Amino acid sequence: MSSISNSLPPGCVVEYLQNNQPVISWVTEVQNHKARLVNINKREVKLPLARVLPWTGPVYSPSSSREAILASLAEHNSQREQLRAELDIMDIWSLAQGEIDSARISWFAELIWEDWDEDHLAALGRAMLQARTHFKFNPPDFQVFPRDVVEKRLEEMRRNEERKRLVTEGNQFFRALWSKQGKAEEPQDADLRDRLKDILLKKISDPEGGEDIPWTDLTAGLPRDGHLPFILARLWGIVPWHYNFHLDQAGYFCGDEWSRDFASEIRDVASSFPETVPGVETEFISVDSLSTTDIDDAFAFLPREDGFLLRLAFACPPYSWPFDSGLDRAVMHRASSL
């Protein structure tokens, strides 16, 4: 097993982070806590020693030619990438999770190898730097996230990827709908189609709401029209051409689907309504036609010695109505002049 030197002599192979990616380099000079390097991209850079990643080596002759330096860097970089590709970083996290909070890179190397060199160490470091959902690099140590944190971060990553795909493909489809006036090809993914339809319907019913809906990104490049959700839904065929979106904005839904949740309460009301009014023996008649289904009044003529007695009967819908029940509140909510 190779040991890691704390010094950086000229000719030492090191790595540093540039745009969150390790860059393999060759030390040409160290002075005043700064190192002058030649990296694999043939650039000369000067940076603080604190930026050098905590895996260094091997060390070559400082008098090596420029061609030899670049050749060595390319060879080590290729070897490290091959070793990194063979690593199961999730297996390493499983072994370390619950054992420690953080450790040096060499501690993790000893979990998986009996013998390792600088290239193995650098390959492991590269893999752990990429696994940001499971490890965090706090120089010179790697912090190991616990399982609950990892699950939360993975779920957040999944939602971000889903949102990114929704915005990208949804915007392409909406712009095609607009430019082709409804003749655009629908997205192939059924879940994506349902999500886009749901977004349009929600924006129709609540134009100012939907903070979780990436509406601005979804409609980038389209006119800033307040009725855009309704227009797109019409072009797509989700709603009819003369659809009354004011009903949606009022929270009013046509049809009897709402009553399914109250089926048992409705049956109780119907069964509790009496066929005849207690204490009234008179038979009443109405003058409504046979097609009338909402007979709400009737009358009866009763002979008397001095003429007739006229009795009027009026329907009383609340006779056995369950006031302040769930059914009552639902019906009251649906009361509308529309």
Image (cartoon, rainbow, N blue to C red):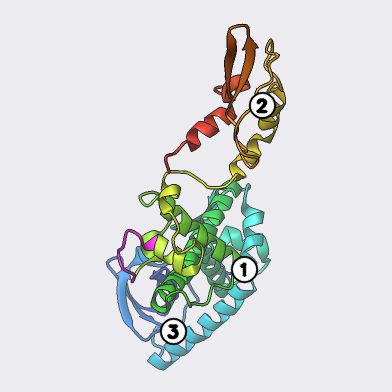
Determine whether 313 is above or below 169 in the image.
above
- Going by the numbered disc 1, the residue's amino acid type is Met
Which badge, 3 or 1, comes first in the chain's sequence? 1
Q: Position of residue 247 (x, y in %)?
A: 44, 48
Quadrant where the C terminus sits is top left
Of 338 and 310, nearer the camera is 310
At horizontal 49% and vertical 68% (from top left) the residue drawn is: 236
Which badge, 1 or 2, comes first in the chain's sequence? 1
Examine the image and state in which quarter residue 320 appears.
top right
Quadrant where the N terminus sits is bottom right
Determine whether 127 is above or below 327 in the image.
below
Q: CA distance from mark 1 to mark 2?
A: 84 Å
Residue that badge 3 annotates: 61
Which secondary structure, mark 3?
loop
- Going by the numbered disc 3, the residue's amino acid type is Ser
Which secondary structure, mark 1?
loop
Residue that badge 2 annotates: 269
Does the rendering let one see residue 18? yes
Q: Position of residue 118 (x, y in %)?
A: 54, 72
Residue that badge 1 annotates: 1
At horizontal 51% and vertical 61% (from top left) the residue drawn is: 197
Determine whether 11 is above or below 87 in the image.
below
- Going by the numbered disc 2, the residue's amino acid type is Val
Dots 1, 2 in contact, CB < 8 A:
no
Nearest to the eye among marks 2 and 3: give it: 2
Which badge, 2 or 3, comes first in the chain's sequence? 3
Q: Position of residue 125 (x, y in %)?
A: 52, 66
Label 2 packing within 10 angstroms: few (<14), some (14-19), many (20+) = some
Of 246 and 169, nearer the camera is 246
Q: Position of residue 33 (x, y in %)?
A: 30, 65
- Range of the magenta residues? 221-229
